[in-house]
Amino acid sequence: MQPLPKHGSCFVCGSDDSPGMGVVWYALDDKSIFAEVTLNDAQQGPPGFAHGGASAALLDEAMGAAVWLAGYRVASVNLNISYRKPVPLGQPFKVTAQVNERNGKKVTAVGEICLADGTLAVSGEGIFVEAPQLFNGLGSEAGQVSEDEL
């Protein structure tokens, strides 16, 4: 298990001095992504539980990291999130993700949030599209991706 490099003030994995969640992601030998996370009141939705957007952001980041780890420079274009159990604040849980398949420029990944007892709380599937032009200063104005570029 090896930690992934930090990348600035990311909302999910930004450093301790950023307003983000401060998650540290790890690459496992099978090229999947793993993190142990404990959310706090800053990520609250219903009293005592995580906001669904915080769970979605964690899965988006985890799945995206898995796709990047596989060597693809992508942007998220679709997320499907299934909420099964509420995620409690102040208690550690695990987030995992892995690449599912690649078809042309489209890469799909899956991710899960499991509570400390192993219960599946949130699952997701993401579609990511290769868009290296977003990451090397090329592409459309203001980082927009045209349909032709996809």
Image (cartoon, rainbow, N blue to C red):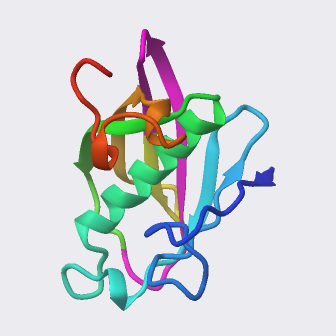
x and y, in percent, of residue 10 in the image: 49, 67
Q: Residue at x 74, y 43 (%)?
A: 28
Q: Residue at x 21, y 79 (%)?
A: 45
Q: Residue at x 60, y 85 (%)?
A: 16
x and y, in percent, of residue 102 in the image: 47, 15
Is 94 within the magenta? yes
- Res. 150 visible in picture: no
Quadrant of the image for the C terminus?
Answer: top left
* Magenta portion: prevailing SS class: strand
Q: Is residue 15 above or below residue 94?
A: below
Give whichever of 97, 83 is nearer the camera.
Answer: 97
Left or right of residue 1, residue 117 in this image: left
Q: Is residue 110 above or below residue 93?
A: above
Left or right of residue 9, residue 56 in this image: left
Write the start and end of the magenta stretch as one range: 88-110
Is 126 within the magenta? no
x and y, in percent, of residue 122 in the image: 34, 52
- Res. 85 visible in picture: yes
Q: Is residue 37 above or below residue 84?
A: below
Give whichever of 124, 76 is nearer the camera.
Answer: 76
Quarter of the figure with residue 138 = top left
Q: Residue at x 32, y 56 (%)?
A: 56
x and y, in percent, of residue 123 in the image: 35, 45
Q: Is residue 79 above or below residue 147?
A: below
Give whichever of 91, 8 is nearer the camera.
Answer: 8
Left or right of residue 149, residue 14 in this image: right
